[in-house]
Amino acid sequence: MTSVTERRHRFRAVLAGEACIHPGSVFDPMSARMAEELGFEAGMFAGSTASLAVLGAPDLILLTLTEFAEQARRICRAARRLPLLVDADHGYGNALNAMRTVEELEAAGVAAMTLEDTVLPRPYGEGGMRLVPIEEGLGRVRAALAARDDPSFVIVARTGAVSVNGIADAVERTRAYSASGADALFYTGIRTRAELDAVAAAATLPIILGGIEGTEVDDREYLAARGVRVALQGHQPIMAAQRAVYETLKALREGTPPSRLPGLPEGGLMARVTREDEYRRRTRNFLGGA
């Protein structure tokens, strides 16, 4: 086990390093323990996976801060060595809401959170994505920094400006957020090396990227050379888990005996991720008997 502050320092070490890592996408305590066991340097808890896990709903900003923070708390309580990076969307409102978001997520044990400049939730009558003005985005970031209690807690300024407003605006926001006091920059929508080269040249902070699979920037050596320290691979684990549950229920409904179901965990996986040995020791030590 490590303390919350130690986990935050471990995530800061990733940002301060020279390599680019892929975090493990997690959505509940057991998936986080699996990522921890497999040696992922960090876990990623996204708003989209949170909406799926908690509400069974698409990512439409229907989840509340309380629901998101509680699921993050469950993950951090269960995986005591894995630093957790979370997607805090737009901070669940204006700059004051962003401050409350920092307070709740820091108390939950999260190592790092992203705060984006997207207009959320979707306004009436609009079909596309829109960003708040740079001044408002900066206000959110500065408010978040003011709300931080543990200086090791990482606050990441996030923008989708490359795909929404174009590279010129992305570079302008990069310069502004680099000077805001944030600890890192997160970009979505980067598809080409020219785009990444442009923002990396303007950035003075470590970079986190989302959504790069299948693009020309999907090369960890190249990413590391451009200051990218974390690159998301997507959120396949929760998708795979839902397929496994569906196929198991379907097989049972169609008459497959439980003993003949395919794909069930082997090799003591369930005992490990539920910490069965630890709970047995606690039972012996504090309840007596076997």
Image (spheres, grey):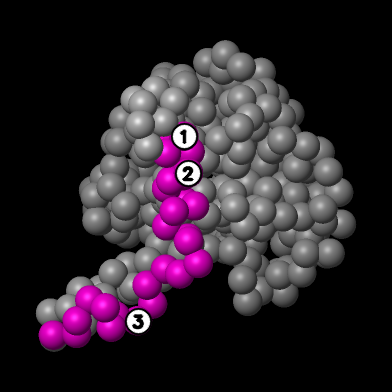
Quarter where residue 254 is shown: bottom left
Q: Nearer the viewer, residue 21 or 137?
A: 21
* Amino acid found under the numbered disc labelled 3: Pro
* On screen, residue 150 above or below 122: above
Quadrant of the snapshot with the C terminus? top left
- Residue extent of the magenta highlight: 255-281
Marks 3 and 1 sit apart, C-alpha to C-alpha, by 32 Å
The residue under label 2 is: 277
Residue that mark 1 sits on: 281
The answer to whether any part of residue 23 appears in the image is no
Residue 125 in picture, x, y percent from top left: 24, 53
Residue 90 colored in magenta in the image:
no
The residue that appears at 87% across and 57% down in the rendered structure is: 225
**Mark 3 vs mark 1: in front:** 1
Above or below residue 200? Residue 15 is above
Determine the secondary structure under disc 2.
helix
| Side of 170 where 73 appears, left or right | left
